[in-house]
Image: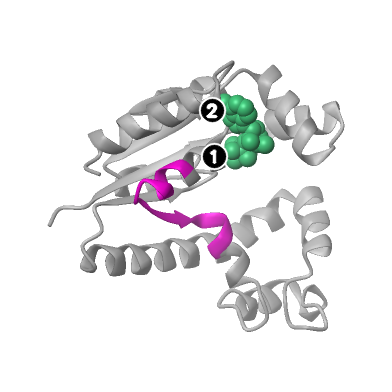
Amino acid sequence: MFSMRAGLTGGIGSGKSTVGRMLAHRGAVLLDADQVAREMTQPGGLAMPAIVQTFGPEFRDTQGALDRTRMRDLAFSSPTSRKQLEAIIHPLVAQCLEDRARTAEDEGQRLLVFDIPLLVESGHWPRQLDAVVVVDCTAETQIRRVMARNALARNAIEDIIAAQSSRAARRRAADVVLYNDQLPLETLQSQVDALAAQFGL
Ligand code: ADP
């Protein structure tokens, strides 16, 4: 049976996770790149040997997991280090998601949704997917939602938004745009239901 592979992306606070949950609720299999990346950097995680080899044992905490604070500081101050880290993690994540996708396809799952925060920036993902779904809203809405969710300061959120792809770049990469702004959750839910039906569920 044919399964469809859809990518799901959107800026911070766009509602990407909400849409992912709604799709999963309708029966889609959600493949979450961030979650896999976290698993890779747990004690015994597949990325840990290369991380220790590249950055040193001080980047491994006493449990054997990645010292996230230390790595975040380094990646923030050194673009080269950030690229090295991505060169370790991204191929492992891609391979793991591919394995899980094949398993789901073998089980006869109809719709696989790849939740990929950096989909638009990626040279890898757009080619692997049958359709790209972008969840979009204004920057002001992103800021309002994230301030409420994470208790972050406005300028910290503005910095995150500025470091991510622009709305225009995301929309260019999209086959489907869900415009999630000033929209009651029930309306978003019906749009997601319609999309799920279109995608074979
Ligand atoms: P992302 O995964 O894109 O960062 P989330 O899906 O976590 O975003 O949404 C951010 C916050 O905004 C969450 O608290 C979510 O419940 C809320 N939210 C998203 N869309 C809507 C909407 N249409 N109406 C009301 N709240 C929303």
Q: Is residue 9 above or below residue 36?
A: above
| Percent of width and height locating residue 95 | 40, 67
Please state the extent of the stretch shown in magenta in the rendering. 22-36
Is 23 one of the magenta-colored residues? yes
- Residue at 56% x, 66% y is 88
| Percent of width and height locating residue 174 | 38, 28
**Residue located beneath label 2 in the image:** 185
Q: Is residue 112 above or below residue 60?
A: above
**Residue located beneath label 1 in the image:** 18
* Scheme of image coloration: one colour
Disc 1 element = helix
Which of the marked residues, 2 or 1, is nearer the chain's N terminus?
Answer: 1
| Residue closest to the far left | 1
Contact between labelled residues 1 and 2, with CB atoms less than 8 Å apart: yes
Quadrant of the rendered structure where residue 153 is? Answer: top right
Q: Is residue 78 above or below residue 61?
A: above
Disc 2 element = helix
| Residue closest to the far right | 153
Determine whether the beta carbon of the residue marked 2 sits less than 8 angstroms from the nearest atom of ligand 1. yes
* Res. 67 in view: yes
- Residue at 63% x, 60% y is 84
